[in-house]
Amino acid sequence: MTPATGASPLAGRRVLLIVGGGIAAVKAPDLVRRLRERGAAVRCVLTRAGHEFTTPLALSSLSEDRVFTDLFDLTDESEMGHIQLSRQADIVLVAPATANLMGRMAAGLAPDLAATLLLATDKPVMIAPAMNVRMWLHPATQRNLALLRGDGVLVAGPNEGSMACGEFGPGRMAEPLEIVAALEAHFGAEPQSRPLQGLRALVTSGPTHEPIDPVRYIANRSSGKQGHAIAASLAAAGAEVVLVSGPTAQPDPAGVQVVRIETARQMLAACQAALPADIAICAAAVADWRVATEAGEKLKKENGAGPPSLSFAENPDILATLSGMSQGRPGLVVGFAAETEKVIEHAIAKRRRKGCDWIVANDVSPATGTFGGDNNSVTLISDGEPESWPPLSKAEVATRLVQRIAARMGSGGQGA
Ligand code: CTP
């Protein structure tokens, strides 16, 4: 298969994919496809519980390799031993990693083929946990997670969202492209697959929270998915990335320095502290206004004065501030334009007003599901004609944007 993303750090890598039991196992075939598109060889191991959700046939068709299961394994020792199977890979990926599988890994138990391979391998291991929110938040799972991290196991996700069981919260498996991005970040050691090696990038992501009083704040619906995906892609491309993030449920992207803030003013200060940077990408949905005077105590309704009236003060514009720096301005400053009507027209005007080099326009009207959703339809506005991209996942938007940035930085276009 032809790699979809040019020189992906996954090209030529061998991934041993252990598919655990859980509804997220239905995404395993897509994960195999995404890995193979990037030139990786994938060999699958399907647990007994995984069989309930996906089939060996689907996995073997997409991996173009045989699939190992406990059933096969009984007869296979002479052909392919456990040890050999676990060590022929460059990485062992467990997706989905169930609470049970994580528990077995943390305890060093090996009752089946998957757990045996995980115990026998001398290769890096990455898990993509997926389980019910209560199971994920349970102290036992969190303890196991800490043990696994301590053992050097890499972790991709989980994401927050509505779950197959009807509950909402963290526990949804990371999307296949997010897992791919985490693997790319891990493997991106060679200079040719790291076009942004040696460059520093600053990314803002998520909403800001602007306090009204000690218990209330003004916020917006930004999930941080797009900004976090961009930070992950920049890191995978070799950049040294500082991600300044408002409050979000997104996991920290692998290999990225994350600075968590709450307000717009804190975001600006954190961005300024992270300079100098070669690339700045402002994907955060910064609150334009803050309450002029934050109440020191909780506003009470008993004082008989009726609802309080809030007066607002304007927040600093981080994108405009970075774009307008007379000294030490990042070579490439990219903004986003969240619009609900006349998307391109407004975005072109916004680019001019804020002085950034590129602006990524996206339609955030409720019908698009962009805010908080996994997909994005964007138009890239630079000096030339606006360039509309097809509807893509936020991870794919991030990959494309980073490819464009790499092309621009590589062509010496580092000035404004
Ligand atoms: N932005 C910023 N600081 C702000 C407001 C916005 O850095 N105080 C950045 C966003 O991160 C984004 C771009 O400016 O990259 C545009 O944000 P958007 O919300 O679309 O525009 P606004 O500046 O809020 O303008 P308007 O409300 O008129 O659409």
Image (cartoon, rainbow, N blue to C red):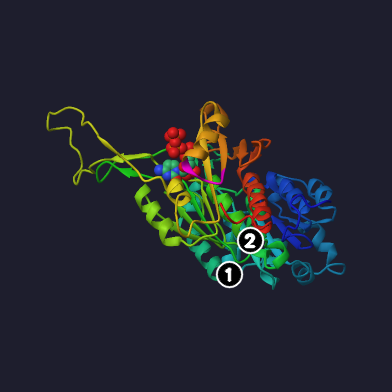
The amino acid type found where label 1 is placed reads: Gly
The range drawn in magenta is 354-358
In the rendered image, which residue does mark 1 sit on?
Answer: 152
State the residue in front, 42 or 260: 260
Q: Which badge, 2 or 1, comes first in the chain's sequence?
A: 1
Question: Disc 2, ligand 1: is the CB inside 8 Å?
Answer: no
Instruction: Tell me the crowding category of disc 1: few under 14, some 14 to 19, or many 20 or more residues within 10 angstroms, Cα based.
Output: few
Residue flagged by tag 2: what amino acid is it?
A: Leu
Q: Quadrant of ligand 1?
A: top left
* Quarter residue 192 falls in: bottom right
List x then y, in percent, for residue 161: 52, 42
The residue positioned 70% from the left and 57% from the top of the image is 18
Q: Position of residue 214 (x, y in %)?
A: 25, 46
The answer to whether 290 is drawn above or below residue 252 in the figure is above
The magenta stretch spans residue 339: no
Of 266 and 374, which appears nearest the observer? 266
SS at mark 1 in the image? loop
Residue at coordinates 44% horizontally, 58% vertically from top-left? 259
Q: Secondary structure at mark 2?
A: loop
Residue occupied by mark 2: 196
Q: Position of residue 53 (x, y in %)?
A: 70, 44
Against 299, is 83 above or below? below
Number of numbered markers: 2
Q: Is residue 355 magenta?
A: yes
Q: Say which of marks 2 and 1 sits in front.
A: 2
Q: Position of residue 392 (x, y in %)?
A: 66, 39
